[in-house]
Amino acid sequence: MVAARDEPSLERFLPMRDQGVLLSASDIDTYRACPLRYKFARVFRIPQEPTLNQRFGIAVHQVLERYHAAAEEGPGDASHGPTPPGSLTQLLTLLESSWRRGGFGDSDEERQLHQKAVAALTRYHERAQADTGTPVWFERQFNFRLGPHLVRGRVDRVDRLPSGEFELIDYKTGRPRSAEQLANDVQLSLYAIAAREAWGLEATRGAYYYLLDDQKVTIPGTAERAEWIRGVATQVAEGIKAQEFEPTPSARACRLCDYRLACPAAER
């Protein structure tokens, strides 16, 4: 019945590059969770209103990006003002600036988030002083070909370990997940392939750094995981190209979906 439906082609709206699909880790996650949600978000481009927690995560990411950029420039840059680059004072000053630009208000929830951000960034600075790894890149962009498809994105941080190996780090402001819960994780596995294909760099492991809990969860890079994520990404890209956008409803996913009012599956 699905194959027999006579629907207008969406080909001109698909995110194509040459003969392939343009993909990111979040695209893959969205499509795997629900192809119809991907269609609403990436094909129809229906705007989504960011939640308070999403805005909070963006603000904290921006603080760390600016903090490390200033530290790389060094103390000779007068634009840093009285706060030396790399100091805790500078880190918290950047938070206040980002907080104002982010339009955060004075509700109880927003005040609690601000307190969590201060505590998290303070611990981040303390950990950085004792960390054995050496950060070498921040917000490093990548793009590479996966067959006809183009995969792009950016890695929050790349560290060189004492052994000379490299670790890919992604910052998170949500609740920590265990390595077992991340068994089918897409993002870090895709980043490991990106490091090899785009930068010529072998990253032996990836890690999620849960900032609010000061917890790092490491995901080892293996040949099996690399082969698995290549297959997953290719399957997703081919599904998008074939315009396979059937919903996969579930109680949890539908409850949290921004498009539930427009989704026919949500009516069931």
Image (cartoon, rainbow, N blue to C red):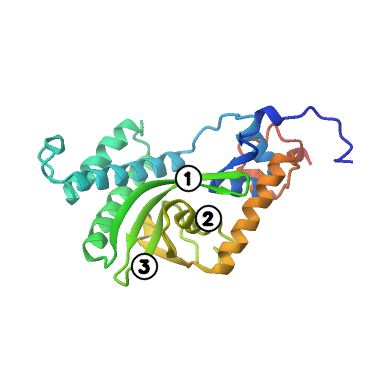
Q: SS class of the residue under badge 1? A: strand
Residue 184, position as x, y percentages in the image = 59, 61
Q: Along the line of sight, which residue is nearer the eye, 252 or 226?
A: 226
Residue at the disc numbered 1:
153
Tag 3 secondary structure: loop
In percent of width and height, residue 126 lies at 23, 60
Asked if labels 1 and 2 touch by Cβ distance under 8 angstroms, the answer is yes
Q: Amino acid under label 3?
A: Glu
The answer for how far apart the CA atoms under marks 2 and 1 are is: 10 Å
The type of residue carrying mark 2 is Leu
* Residue closest to the eye, 213 or 136: 136
Nearer the camera: disc 3 or disc 1: 3
Give the side of residue 268 with respect to residue 169, left or right: right
Q: Earlier in the sequence, mark 3 or mark 1?
A: 1
Q: Residues within 10 Å of mark 2 (few under 14, many from 20)?
A: many
- Residue flagged by tag 1: what amino acid is it? Gly
Residue indicated by mark 3: 165
In the picture, the disc for residue 190 is 2
Residue at image location 62% in from the left, 62% down from the top: 228
Seen from the viewer's position, the closer of residues 27 and 88 is 27
Hey, which quadrant is residue 169 in on the image? bottom left
Residue for point 69% across, 49% down: 251
Horizontal and vertical percent for residue 137? 32, 52
Residue 161 in sight from this viewpoint: yes
Q: Earlier in the sequence, mark 2 or mark 1?
A: 1
Q: CA distance from mark 3 to mark 1?
A: 22 Å
Sort mark 3 into few (<14), some (14-19) or many (20+) by Cα contacts within 10 Å.
some
| Closer to the eye: label 3 or 2 | 3
At 26% across and 44% down in the image, what residue appears? Answer: 69
